[in-house]
């Protein structure tokens, strides 16, 4: 069993801590103050006369700390996104901006003119060109594809392995949903002899394809040659051999029918991340459900961060969170490690302002240690006394 090293938490101002950290980090997640103005419920100030002046010396450390293929993800809203983009362009280079993702959550204000429901995830690479040249491909699970896979698995299980019955039950599930699912997805409506969901595809090579095979395939039952597509097969001989070995070529009832290619949904159940996604905010509800944790304004969502952390890094990633806040990034890493056996490690920097560390961070991370079986190490000002204290519940009112 893989052992995960403790997640180190440094208590102090990140401006003081960052110069002493050593990289490389595969991911740096930034959740800086949004500069909303005023005093938020936990008592720390979120008003800056010069927000860019506050952020610039902190962001200056990013290039030194990032791995060669490292990624920066920054959460922000409309107030400061323009300034953040300029700052990150300056320290990382405008050409390393991968994209800006819009997270459509839920209504969080009561404005008379516009109900703002979105945040941004601004994404940069240390070296965008090198990342692309490495062959790195980001993929995220498709919820609609997973629903189909789950339905097929249920049909197979309840049919006790009877392929015909399983396919009938799956199509009964699929029929009323066809209009709401993408057409390309609903083509996966066949269940094979192992219970896997698939579709069949045209085996013929397109006219522009250079590498192709014209060899005849022998029908497994009649032992006679099957028709070859007019322009040849869309795979070469080596690929055809692999597909035959793995059962990805489906023969018809006899040799007069041209074989088809099997496309398995399980192999196509992910997609390139889209720049806009919708997911209800659950961060506050999750944090409120942890016993002994005080109030914290707008904690980040586990599911949202888990989705993106898992997309842009591997299971052994080193992650830096200079604005640790309520500790969501550490819980995300712990949850992902427990799920896939990974060894992700988050280094966090927590500013002990307004009682956040004692009232929120410590009880949350103690809960996480018990829940996920991983540990946190503490360093910095008053870290030992804070980590050992029993947290208090309480908060200041918004000014």
Image (tube, helix red, strand yellow):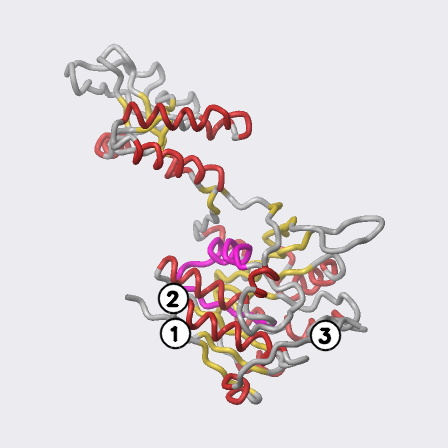
Q: For the C terminus, which image quadrant?
A: bottom right
Coordinates of residue 171 in the picture (x, y in percent) = 40, 25
Q: For the N terminus, which image quadrant?
A: bottom left
**Disc 2 packing (10 Å; few <14; some 14–19; many ≥20):** many
Quarter of the image for residue 361 reads bottom right
Quickly name the residue at label 3: 54
- The segment highlighted magenta reads 302-324
What kind of element bears circle 1? Answer: loop
Residue 349 makes an appearance in the image: yes
Determine whether 334 is above or below 54 in the image.
above
Quarter of the image for residue 358 reads bottom right
Quickly name the residue at label 2: 343
Quickly name the residue at label 1: 5
- Residue at mark 2 to residue at mark 3: CA–CA distance: 33 Å
What kind of element bears circle 2? Answer: loop
Depth check: 29 or 229 in front? 29
Name the residue located 54 percent from the left edge and 58 percent from the top edge: 305
């Amino acid at each position: 069993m893989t052992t995960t090293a403790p997640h180190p938490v440094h208590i102090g101002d990140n401006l003081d801590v960052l110069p002493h950290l050593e990289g490389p980090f595969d991911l740096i997640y930034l959740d800086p103050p949004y500069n909303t103005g005023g005093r938020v419920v936990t008592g720390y100030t979120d008003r800056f006369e010069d927000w860019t002046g506050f952020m610039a010396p902190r962001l200056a450390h990013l290039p030194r700390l990032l791995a060669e293929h490292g990624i920066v993800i920054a959460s922000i809203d409309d107030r400061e996104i323009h300034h953040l983009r300029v700052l990150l362009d300056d320290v990382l280079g405008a050409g390393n901006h991968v994209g800006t993702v819009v997270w459509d959550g839920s209504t969080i204000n009561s404005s008379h003119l516009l109900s703002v429901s979105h945040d941004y995830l601004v994404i940069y690479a240390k070296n965008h060109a090198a990342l692309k040249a490495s062959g790195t491909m980001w993929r995220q699970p498709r919820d609609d594809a997973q629903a189909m896979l789950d339905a097929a698995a249920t049909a197979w299980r309840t049919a006790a392995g009877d392929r015909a019955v399983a396919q009938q039950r799956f199509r009964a599930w699929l029929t009323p949903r066809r209009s709401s699912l993408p057409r390309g997805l609903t083509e996966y409506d066949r269940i094979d002899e192992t219970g896997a969901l698939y579709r069949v595809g045209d085996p013929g090579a397109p006219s522009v394809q250079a590498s192709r095979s014209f060899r005849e395939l022998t029908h497994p039952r009649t032992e006679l040659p099957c028709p070859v597509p007019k322009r040849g097969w869309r795979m070469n001989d080596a690929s055809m051999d692999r597909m035959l070995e793995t059962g990805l070529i489906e023969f018809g009832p006899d040799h007069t029918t041209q074989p088809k290619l099997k496309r398995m949904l399980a192999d196509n159940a992910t997609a390139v991340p889209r720049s806009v996604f919708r997911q209800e905010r659950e961060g506050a509800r999750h944090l409120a459900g942890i016993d002994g944790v005080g109030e914290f304004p707008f904690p980040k969502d586990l599911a949202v961060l888990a989705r993106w952390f898992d997309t842009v890094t591997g299971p052994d990633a080193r992650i830096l969170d200079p604005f640790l806040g309520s500790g969501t990034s550490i819980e995300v890493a712990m949850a992902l490690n427990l799920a896939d056996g990974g060894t992700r490690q988050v280094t966090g920097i927590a500013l002990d302002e307004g009682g956040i560390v004692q009232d929120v961070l410590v009880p949350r991370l103690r809960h996480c240690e018990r829940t996920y079986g991983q540990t946190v190490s503490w360093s910095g000002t008053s870290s030992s006394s804070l980590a050992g204290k029993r947290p208090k519940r309480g908060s200041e009112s918004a000014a």
